[in-house]
Image: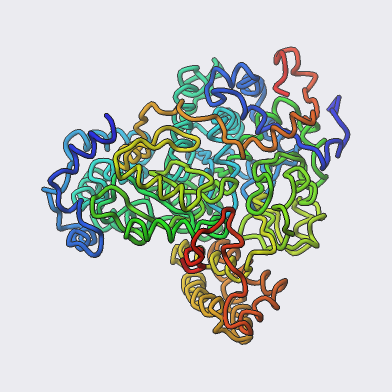
Amino acid sequence: MTATPGAPGEARASSLTPVLTERWDLEDSFTRRVYERNGGYKALRQALQRSPESIVEAVKDSGLRGRGGAGFPTGMKWSFVPKDSPKPTYLVVNADESEPGTCKDIPLMMADPHLLVEGVIISSYAIGATHAFIYVRGEVLTVIRRLQHAVVEAYEAGFIGANILGSGFDLEITVHAGAGAYICGEETALLDSLEGRRGQPRLKPPFPAVAGLYASPTVINNVETIASVPSIVSNGSGWFRSMGSEKSPGYGIFSLSGHVTRPGQYEAPLGVTLNELLDMAGGIRAGHELKFWTPGGSSTPMLTAEHADVPLDFEGMAGVGSMLGTRALQIFDDTTCVVRATGRWVEFYKHESCGKCTPCREGFWWMVQIFDRLEQGQGTEADLEKLLDMSDNIAGRSFCALADGGVAPVMSSIQYFRDEYIAHFEHGGCPFDPADSALFTVERQEEAGVNA
Amino acid sequence: MSPSDDVTNEQSGRPEERMRSGVPPEDAAATRPGVADSAATKLDAKARAEMLEIVARYPEPRSALLPMLHLVQSYDGYVTPAGIEMCAEVLGLTEAEVAAVATFYTMYKRRPVGDYHVGVCTNTLCAIMGGDAIWSELSEHLGVGHDETTDDGTVSLERVECNAACDYAPVLMVNWEFVDNQTPQSARELVDTLRSGGAVNSSRGPRVCTWKQAERVLAGFPDGAETQGVSAGPASLAGLRLAKEKGWTAPTGGQPELDATSGEDQK
């Protein structure tokens, strides 16, 4: 590389770096007209003048890691696709954003669907796919409309279809709406769902890169990952690496929700800290203090105020026993009962378990019973040991990561808030008033109830 | 077509749609796909042709099943035995295979749904920010519980899981459109408007259409409403607005060897 714009870490922390979110405030940002007027589809033209291999190399060099939670290096994932397969290669975009707290891909696709479409075209070109699917969760009608329309507009402009911009490259894109199943965010369950089956995970190996959709080579990437590709192609891997940290380069959307003054989407270099983000978001709700938070959705072990200065990157979060996940920062203040919060998450995992693996299907069902008892003040310390024991028997003993994710809030809440669990026994019930946590004044106390 | 036309034409004189969902007889039929009630279905030759259109979008026909089931709901309001039969026939599957898929996903309903499906997020974050209070208010006000429909067939109520709008908590979904930053009072007013046939605007998208119209979009038949609503809501823009106020940007990019062809850079 002849010129590396910016020094590593130049834009690290304490400031924001809008790239993916940059166009969101434009009127009609979701149209091709506005997208092109603001630099859109230039990266596609650049990419088509280069070899597919050089795009894969650029993404590899950038160090981009999957933005859907696991953080696997994207370029490496792409390079696993066999070059000599007699079967077609597919690109599948995982737009099934459902991890509790995660709310970045949905606004991205609502405001700037062409950015995703451009990323899909470039990525398909890089991996040699001629048919790409955008699997979007069904429960977001406006987003689905905008995606459908963006794809139609891109076809009209000759960006999708046969012989794209005279390059000889052909691509079809299909927008596919899901039907309500968290598990379909797991990549192999997503593939089964896209094949018209119940969304249940597959045993790996074989990995999707070798045998994915229709047992053909398939790359599955998150929306934000694919949407990052055009900027890497345009600006170079050095530019991308000038943000973030060495092992977690680049920018990402951080989603702040809960007891924070200005919740919302904040796009920053990886490695920003919760305290820095809270400063930008006006801090914790007035008159209250941070109690616990998730760094990347409910499946990432919760943290407390003592972790608010730890860099929000893959290494920083792993270093404190959690995970960066989807950068879904759910923030809870001192009015929140951690037992109530955890119990509700466990109910979610029980509801969303696909039922394939016994430890997950049965384990979360029993955990819900225990949490009901705990929240009503009828538990004992033996129940806490039971929960930890069950957690050991659920995590790592099922096909997919739903099981591991589901025990994360259980284990971490007992780790940090054992005393609060015990206070429920001593108090004979929940010592918190749920009305205090609500963002509005509850007119009738009885309606705020935890078992509403 | 206005939502009210849809209501009048498609639902009058259909007692099963008026029935409050307990365990109505058609539920038993829905779980036994072989027992089709042809009188209860609107699926016709046009629907069958549309199913074939969906099939043509995919390299392998079975991939069409999920959108086809959305299409069934756009005609019949829920996954009827006749809908299962038609999907099976079009795809060359058994009805049991189709029913196995239909029963896996929560968006597919096995009982008639009201014209307006109201989902209250009661996952942890929304619940704690006030979603539980909203749920209690609505359930009591409407006199229905989870996955039940009001006697007049207008509103179905459901506790939904996280819908990816946490920065707008507490959130309601009406026919899968976002209704942001709710309170018990605003939610009560919303369902009252829906029941009285008034128009309801979603927070970031268009005016709320009917359940059946929404299902048609999910099946991949656009309704042309994509330009309605904002580009992004206020919370989605919180970071961007702050960055602009402070003059924060991503570093200037650009690969020298490509500048000649790219003109002005994206960044």
Q: Which is more toward the observer, A343 or A228?
A: A343
Q: Residue A192 appears at what percent x and percent y?
A: 43, 52
Q: Quadrant of the N terminus of chain A?
A: top right
Q: Is residue A393 above or below residue A39?
A: below
Is residue B34 rendered to the left or right of residue B161? left
Q: Which is more toward the observer, A18 or B51?
A: A18
What scheme was used to colour the molecule?
rainbow
Q: Residue B59 appears at what percent x and percent y?
A: 39, 37
Q: Which is more toward the observer, A356 or B191?
A: B191
The residue at 13%/53% (across/down) is B37
Q: Residue B62 appears at what percent x and percent y?
A: 34, 45
The residue at 63%/45% (across/down) is A80
Q: Is residue A436 above or below residue A430?
A: above
Q: Determine the residue located farthest toward the front in the rendered image.
A: A443
Q: Is residue A185 visible?
A: yes
What is the quadrant of residue A434 in the picture? bottom right
The residue at 57%/63% (across/down) is A435
What is the quadrant of residue A418 in the picture? bottom right
Is residue A215 rendered to the left or right of residue B231? left
Mark count: 0
Q: Is residue A378 above or below residue A343?
A: below
Is residue A279 rendered to the left or right of residue A375? right
Q: Is residue A187 visible?
A: no
The residue at 69%/29% (across/down) is A231
Q: Residue A70 appears at what percent x and percent y?
A: 65, 53
